Image: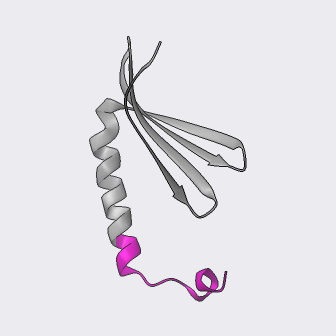
Amino acid sequence: MDTELFCEQVQVERKSFSVELRENPRGRFLKIIEDVGGRRDAIIIPATGLTQIRDILERAISKSDEVPLSESATAQ
């Protein structure tokens, strides 16, 4: 049985994301659930990898901020 330690949801365009920090007898983990029109997909990240994932996300955000959108992305 998992215990929920933290949960937050966010709506981005047509997608809904749920981010849950959970714990079970094997340890803590982050569960990210994407819901698009009733179809749900999830990824599980062990707590030991959260700092690495955060660092990658920070680099991706920085790159997204510094590189302008391509014409094909702005036409959608």
At horizontal 45% and vertical 17% (from top left) the residue drawn is: 2
At horizontal 31% and vertical 50% (from top left) the residue drawn is: 54
Q: Position of residue 56 (x, y in %)?
A: 34, 54
Please name whichever residue, 25 or 12, is drawn nearer the observer in this view of the structure.
Answer: 12
Please name whichever residue, 39 or 44, is drawn nearer the observer in this view of the structure.
Answer: 39
Q: Position of residue 34 (x, y in %)?
A: 58, 46
Query: In the displayed structure, would residue 6 be above or below residue 56?
Result: above
Query: In the displayed structure, would residue 66 be above or below residue 29?
Result: below
Image-based side of 68 in relation to 72, left or right = left
Quadrant of res 15: bottom right
The magenta stretch spans residue 64: yes
Quadrant of res 59: bottom left
Please name whichever residue, 2 or 25, is drawn nearer the observer in this view of the structure.
Answer: 2
Residue interval drawn in magenta: 63-76
Q: Position of residue 63 (x, y in %)?
A: 36, 72
Image-based side of 36 in relation to 54, left or right = right
At horizontal 50% and vertical 83% (from top left) the residue drawn is: 69
Query: In the displayed structure, would residue 6 be above or below residue 73?
Result: above
Q: Position of residue 17 (x, y in %)?
A: 53, 48
At horizontal 35% and vertical 80% (from top left) the residue drawn is: 66
Q: The C terminus is located in which quarter?
A: bottom right
The magenta stretch spans residue 48: no
